[in-house]
Amino acid sequence: MLALVVAGGCGSRQGATTGTVDVGRHHLRFQVPKGWEHLDRGRQQLFRNGETRLLLEDLGPASREGVVREVREAERLWRGGQWMVAHSRIQNLRSPILRYASSDQRLDFYREWNNATYVPAAADSAAIGPAFQALIDGAAELPESSDASLLQYSLENAFDMRRMEIGSREKKTIHGADWSVVEVWDRVSHIWRLRLACVENDGCLLALWTDMGRIELAEPAFEALLASIELLPDATDGGHR
């Protein structure tokens, strides 16, 4: 039975196939595991069965081009009069490229922007254009992400990796997309097993992981949901919600 996922925070029917869904900037469809409930939260999708939960989330730009796209969108918002939203978007920009850059590289990337927007409400309009352009130019100087850094970034967003370690790792091609799939467990006891899969899609990072609950419920649902995810072209620029 086909059930379209509607506005953020609304649910789909259990075991239903979605229509096309925007998960942040990712345009996709998937099959909700049988017996599970799906809640659409925009850039984060929640799947739950009692207290057991899976999360599917857009983790932000994974390439220089992705960072540039974020900057251009913020500039569009600023010039459209939404300067507070635009400023927040730049200040809260999260990316593995920025996360693993050196402190000097991050300082250089933000220097002109910070100087121009030290007091956002009083920012000189003549300085905003060059500040946005400096961010765009600066993205080209940031280190490009590797598969290893994308996986590490996904793990750090999903789990407390001070307590966990990778137990197994593999590559899976699903509907033409190459996913990194890992199992992690407690460093000391090697129990409390959790799963995560991530993929770069159109310059952005998408990750699915087991968030909490019973392993015997989470593992088959994780595998079924992951196998059903189909990444679609032509994601809309307005995908962030």
Image (cartoon, rainbow, N blue to C red):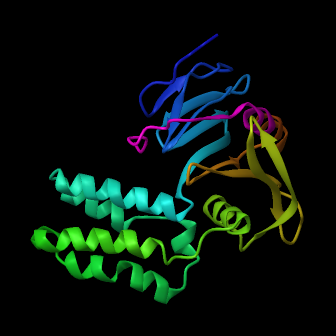
* Residue 231, quarter of picture: top right
Q: Position of residue 113 (x, y in %)?
A: 28, 76
Nearer to me, 37 or 6: 6
Residue drawn where x is 19% and y is 59% of the image: 83
Q: Which of these two is toward me, 235 or 22?
A: 235
Question: Which quadrant, please, contains the N terminus?
Answer: top right
Where residue 93 sits, quadrant-wise, is bottom left
Task: Tell me: residue 147, above or below residue 119.
Answer: above
Residue 64 in percent (x, y) is at 51, 65
Which quadrant, please, contains the C terminus?
top left
Q: State left or right for residue 237 relative to residue 50.
A: left
Outermost residue on the bottom side: it is 104
Image check: 216 left or right of 102?
A: right
Residue at (60% x, 13% y) in the render: 2
Query: Could you tell me residue 180's position as x and y percent?
Result: 77, 54
- Determine if the magenta segment contains residue 73: no
Q: Find residue 112 and report its horizontal and vertical position in percent.
A: 29, 81
| Number of numbered discs visible in the structure rendering | 0
The magenta region covers 222-241
Residue found 69% across the figure and 34% down from its top: 229
Residue 227 among those drawn in magenta: yes
Front residue (pair 139, 87): 139
Report the residue at 64% width, 58% height from top: 158
